[in-house]
Image: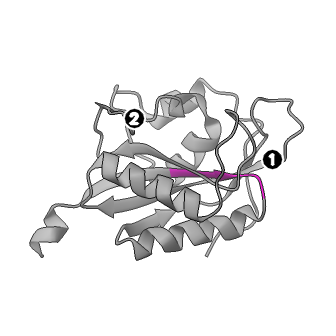
């Protein structure tokens, strides 16, 4: 085992998109992560959820979670995600606006971090079934750094609006 392999950390990245072709954009993001030297270990199924806020007339979101390994520290990884978003056409406008892609670093090796570029774990992940359900698929035994299991977090949410897509990405 190489020294570099020993320095790798586990991270989970949430993907969401509701413009253009979300499935294609997800695969482009996965490819970009791999090209950047980030090791992709697992990719969830695609999950569909209503646009936020609920009741808006924006298109539904396609969501997924990607399990990765990397030597980069969390802020550098987050900057990589922001760069990939820009490269794939993300334009930041109003909060909760429809988007071509959104890549969120939701967990980085269980770290708790409040950095100008990223907060870990992601501060709103526990409120989002469209993050927790695909996370459960790729990391069923994951535990929030605050101590809550995925099962306990999911029990607090309305899961009825989030559903798995019939198409699994390849």
Of callouts 1 and 2, which one flags the residue occurring earlier in the amino acid sequence? 1
Residue at which label 2 appears: 121
Q: Which disc is residue 60 wearing?
A: 1
Q: Quadrant of the N terminus?
A: bottom left
Left/right placement of residue 58 relative to residue 77 reads right
Q: Position of residue 19 (x, y in %)?
A: 77, 55
Q: Secondary structure beneath disc 1?
A: loop
Q: What kind of element bears circle 2?
A: loop
Residue 12 visible in the displayed image: yes
Q: Is residue 93 above or below residue 100?
A: above
Q: Badge 2 local density, few (<14 within 10 Å), some, or many (20+)?
A: many
Magenta stretch? 14-19
Q: Splitting the image into 4 quarters, where does residue 168 fall?
A: bottom right
Taking the view exactly as shown, the residue that stands out farthest to the left is 3
Residue 131 at x, y percent in the picture: 57, 42
What secondary structure prevails in the magenta region? strand
How far, Cα to Cα, is label 1 from label 2? 25 Å
């Amino acid at each position: 085992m190489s020294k570099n392999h020993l320095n790798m950390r586990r991270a989970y990245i949430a993907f969401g998109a509701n413009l253009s072709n979300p499935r294609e954009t997800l695969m482009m993001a996965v490819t970009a992560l791999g090209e950047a030297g980030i090791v992709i270990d697992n990719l969830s199924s695609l999950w569909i959820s209503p646009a936020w806020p609920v009741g808006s007339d924006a298109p539904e979101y396609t969501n997924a979670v990607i399990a990765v390994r990397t030597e980069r520290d969390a802020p550098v990884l987050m900057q990589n995600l922001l760069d990939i978003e820009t490269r794939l056409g993300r334009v930041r406008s109003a909060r909760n606006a429809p988007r071509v892609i959104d890549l969120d670093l939701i967990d980085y090796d269980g770290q708790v971090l409040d950095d100008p570029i990223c907060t870990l774990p992601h501060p709103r992940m526990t409120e989002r079934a469209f993050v927790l359900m695909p996370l459960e698929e790729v990391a069923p035994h994951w535990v929030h750094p605050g101590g809550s299991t995925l099962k306990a977090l999911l029990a607090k949410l309305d899961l009825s609006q989030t559903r798995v897509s019939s198409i699994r990405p390849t």
